[in-house]
Image (cartoon, rainbow, N blue to C red):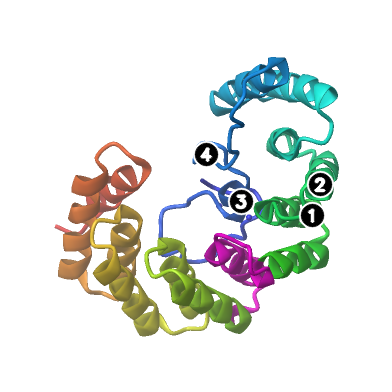
Amino acid sequence: MNLRSESRSKRPWSGRTPRLGVALLALGLASGALPARAQTNDAESRFNIGLMHMREGRIDVAIEEFKKAVKQEPTNPFFLKGLGQAYAQKRKYKEAAECFRKALQANPYYVDVRNDLGMALMLGGERDEGKKEFLTAYGDPTNPTPEISARNLGQAWLEEKNYAEALNWFRTTVNRNKAYPDGYLGMADAYYNLGKVDEAIAQLEAGLKELPNDASLQVALGEACYKAGRFSDARSHLEAAAQQDGAGPYGRRAQQLLQGFPK
């Protein structure tokens, strides 16, 4: 569940450039989701090598390195999470879920792993169980990022076309963290699917007030304005996105949309 997440449903209008959905958001490594331990030993070295391979797309090699680290320290929650993430990248969701469960057994306070577990379960077809994990993570007072858990729930309901429930959770996301663009993007998606295009645009505009330099919001608002026939506004937002993100994914998407703009 988003980079195009394989679990994300296709909709008539996305309101944004496809981004890593819940899956990659919850399972991503590049953001530093896996904290390093203070001391370096052979297991730690294996783990770090695994991270390097995973970031560079060599998932099979990463799995082997993570396995070696786990073999040496079978109750290290960081190593288990890394292995689980690598399995998830290979779409081995059953194996991924097992690793995440072991990580939680090793450290019940490692709440972030519940997002990983929830995603693995959902991608493995156990959607109700996955949503339960997201909800548990959201309700845990030690969760450092409840907005991500709320966003995951919103995305899950959006994919199941329960747009009203999705809207509630995306609104919760924004209430938890007004600087998290996925909340505004999610609300826009939900409103659009409810047939409320003006409300969708209003949420994206609210997001840009909070995050004026966020290219994903600029692209989404540009595309939304275009769909609503507000071509001047659409061009303005798309040009801003192209300038802000340059050769990045949102900049490229903006440039693509501008090429098809009416003269």
Name the amino acid type tagged 1.
Leu
In which quadrant of the rendered image does the N terminus lie? bottom right
Which residue is disc 3 drawn over? 26
The disc label shown at residue 32, or none: 4
Residue at 22% over, 48% down? 244
Distance Cα–Cα, label 2 vs label 3: 13 Å
Q: Give the foreground label among 1 and 3.
A: 3
Q: Give the foreground label among 1 and 4.
A: 4
Q: Residues within 10 Å of mark 2 (few under 14, many from 20)?
A: many
Name the dominant secondary structure of the magenta segment: helix
Residue at 37% over, 43% down? 249
Task: Give how far across and how far down residue 91 sits, in percent.
Answer: 75, 39
Which residue is disc 1 drawn over? 121
Task: For mark 3, give the secondary structure.
Answer: helix
Q: Tell which of 139 and 13 is nearer to you.
A: 139
Q: Is residue 151 left or right of residue 94?
A: left
The disc label shown at residue 97, or none: 2
Residue at 49% over, 41% down? 31
Name the amino acid type tagged 3.
Ala
Residue at 82% over, 64% down? 129
Asked whether disc 2 touches disc 3, contact meaning CB atoms under 8 Å apart, the reply is: no
**Magenta residues?**
138-163
